[in-house]
Amino acid sequence: MVKIFNSIKRHFAINQMADFFEKVERNPVLRTPKEIGLDFEAISFKSLDELNLKAWYLPSEKSNKVVIFNHFMLGNRAGAVPHKNWGNIGVDFMPIYKHLVDSGYNVFTYDLRNHGESDLYKGGKLGLTHIEYQDSVASVRYVKDRFPQMDYYLFSQCYGGVSTMRAMEKHPEDFEDIKAFINLQPLSADAFVTGVTTKFNLAHENNINKFSERLKKKTGYTVDECKTPDIADAVKIPTLLVQVHKDFRTTEKDIQDVYDNLGTEDKELLWIEDVEERLEGYNYFARKPEKMIDWFDKH
């Protein structure tokens, strides 16, 4: 009877996880940089497939450096309001922007498709970064076209981070002159399933296969098409990889594999040890900006 009950729980959990990756629930953009005393320009630019993407440009006085910043799934360029599926923890990017601007970095930050105030794509259907990479490429091209004499840096997170890596794989020429990259908490589908089911005592050797079948039906993609270590070699620029060490929504092995596979020798892996919840990782550089600024400054 216990085995049957656990099997039902696994089935429900796997279906629920796959459903979560089918369609995004928009987070509202409730704040602007003006609230913390930062000047900004509201911008709209086009993705490679002609969607309107909303952005802010935050100038730093007499600076020739710009950080292209993107967000995680469920978030937007302001951060994220607390969400029941992700620990009811809010994320606020405004302090990070202030740290960057005060340190001499202009900031270009934007909403991925289906997020924030950017255009809807196929009713909100996610492309598991196989579509969203077009937003990452477009953001880099827009910034380079508008600010051709600047030094360029990248700060990408989770879904946005994997989209950036996939953009590097598909359009490497657009990223050759990027000075440095901070990649915060990139996620793989198989690591997500393993981490979550282990956390809730639902681990089983067939979980990933079942999840992959369900994911294919809901999104058109399998788990094998969503393994971040497989595209890490496309990252050829100096990279700081950052991850909450005790985050149960991934595995230490997956993050280590991403790091090991990065296509650059100039790399570091920073484990966040002072929190356990994944969303708190997105607030990390708001609390402790020193490593972020140091990584960009030395490149």
Image (tube, helix red, strand yellow):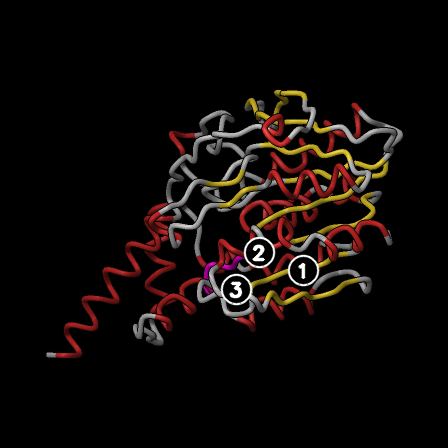
Which residue: 39% across, 54% down?
87
Whether residues under marks 2 and 1 lie with C-beta atoms below 8 angstroms apart, the answer is yes
Q: Horizontal placement of 159 versus 150: left or right?
A: left
Q: Which residue lies furthest to the left in this view?
A: 1
Q: Earlier in the sequence, mark 2 or mark 1?
A: 2
Callout 3 amino acid: Val
Q: What stretch is highlighted in magenta?
A: 185-191
Tag nearer the camera, 2 or 3: 3
Compared to residue 62, the image places residue 162 above or below, namely below
Task: Kindly indicate the quadrant of the structure image that contains residue 60.
Answer: top right
Q: Is residue 249 above or below residue 91?
A: below
How many other residues sit within 10 Å of disc 1, few (<14), some (14-19) or many (≥20)? many
Mark 3, residue position: 275
Coordinates of residue 193 in the picture (x, y in percent):
40, 64
Task: Give the residue at x 75% y 37%.
Answer: 101
| Neighbours of disc 3 within 10 Å: few (<14), some (14-19), many (20+) | some
How far apart are the two marked residues, 1 and 3, measured between alpha carbons? 17 Å
Q: What element carries label 1?
A: strand
| Residue at mark 2 | 186
Residue 190 on the magenta span: yes
Mark 2 → mark 1, Cα distance in angstroms: 8 Å
299 and 292: which one is in front? 292
Residue type highlighted by circle 2 = Pro
User: SS of the residue at dot 2?
Assistant: loop
Asked whether 175 or 298 is in front, the reply is 298
- In primary-sequence order, the first of circles 1 and 3 is 1
Looking at the rendered structure, the secondary structure element under dot 3 is loop
Say the numbered circle drawn on residue 286: none
Outermost residue on the bottom side: it is: 2
Q: Residue 241 carries which label?
A: 1
